[in-house]
Amino acid sequence: MARENPTDHVLGIDIGGTGIKGAIVDLATGEFLTEWQRIDTPEDATPESVGRIVGELAGRFDHRGTTGVTYPGVIENGVAMTAANLDSGWIGTSLVDTIGRHIPGDEVFVNDADAAGLAEVRYGAGSGHKGLVVLITWGTGIGTALIYDGQLIPNSELGHIEVHGHEAEKRAAASVMKRKGLSWEQWAERASQYLQALERLVWPELFVFGGGISKKPDHWLPMIECRTPITVAKLINNAGIVGAALVAHESLTIGMPRQPHR
């Protein structure tokens, strides 16, 4: 018989475009209690195939409590509303029905950038900051999370605002720099224009930068021009797992946990 898990030991699973990973998190510290496990995201990335992989991953842990699961898109009432880097068949799909049925116990779903942002504010680069903290992940697109006085404002999707007549993430995502062969200086100019536009909308007290560029801040940080202080994410690749577990533990109304398995 599987042991009962302490309520502050929660399984977090992070669904990404290339990999699905998870670990049991100690929410007293934000640290992993187990080695993290990873399985490649299926090439077709349909709800059914991803659901099976999530179930396989969850089965590697001796856990019967609540599980938090990130999803790379907007979630409303447990339903996927967008499908970044996944099959378009996700749109309008119940995450509870397609993924949750493969997970023992209850599950809560959360946008992946939201999970990372909340984790950084509670345990990482944004810890101790009051007011509005904005996490920005620079990757294939631009992901954002808004956290005000430690509370998450879900599904912000501010990477899609218009800058100079174009969607921001189509000008300033890290993938654009690689695809168009931009120098760090050229990318920093575009990123600065995006940040300045964002500042006019939400007036944050701190930007936390995540994504691949956060590993090389010396390349770009001195060239960024905006009024808001910037810090670099600390949890990096662990933030999604930790944030998923945290949201599940606190039972925020971002996802829709279903009834326990009988």
Image (spheres, grey):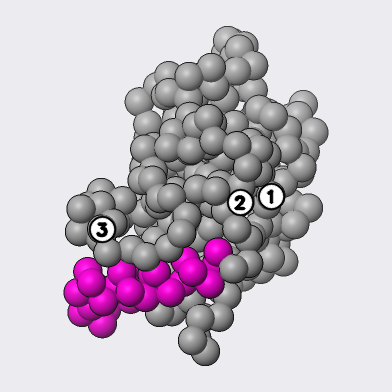
Q: Residues within 10 Å of mark 2 (few under 14, many from 20)?
A: many
Please check the rendered image and state whether residue 195 is part of the magenta-colored stretch, yes or no: yes
Tag 1, which secondary structure? strand
Which comes sooner in the sequence, label 2 or label 1?
2
Q: Residues within 10 Å of mark 1 (few under 14, many from 20)?
A: few
Q: Quadrant of the N terminus?
A: top right
**How far is mark 2 from mark 3, CA to CA?**
24 Å
Which label belongs to residue 162? Answer: none
Task: Mark yes or no: residue 61 visible.
Answer: no
Instruction: Give the mark toward the camera: 3 or 1.
Output: 3
- Which corner quadrant of the image does residue 42 belong to? bottom left
Relative image position of residue 182 (x, y in whole percent): 23, 78
Hey, what amino acid is under mark 1? Ile
Hey, what amino acid is under mark 3? Pro
In percent of the image, x 26 and y 82: which residue is there? 180
**How far is mark 2 from mark 1, CA to CA?**
5 Å
Tag 3, which secondary structure? helix
Determine contact: label 3, label 1, CB under 8 Å: no
- Residue located beneath label 3 in the image: 222
In percent of the image, x 25 and y 58: which residue is there? 222
**How far is mark 3 from mark 1, CA to CA?**
30 Å
| As drawn, 187 above or below 126 | below
- Residue located beneath label 1 in the image: 153
Relative image position of residue 43 (x, y in whole percent): 40, 64
Assign the magenta stretch its main secondary structure. helix
| As drawn, 99 above or below 61 | below
Task: Mark yes or no: residue 121 visible.
Answer: yes
Hey, what amino acid is under mark 2? Leu
Which label belongs to residue 146? Answer: 2
Determine contact: label 2, label 1, CB under 8 Å: yes
In percent of the image, x 37 and y 75: which residue is there? 190
The magenta region covers 174-199
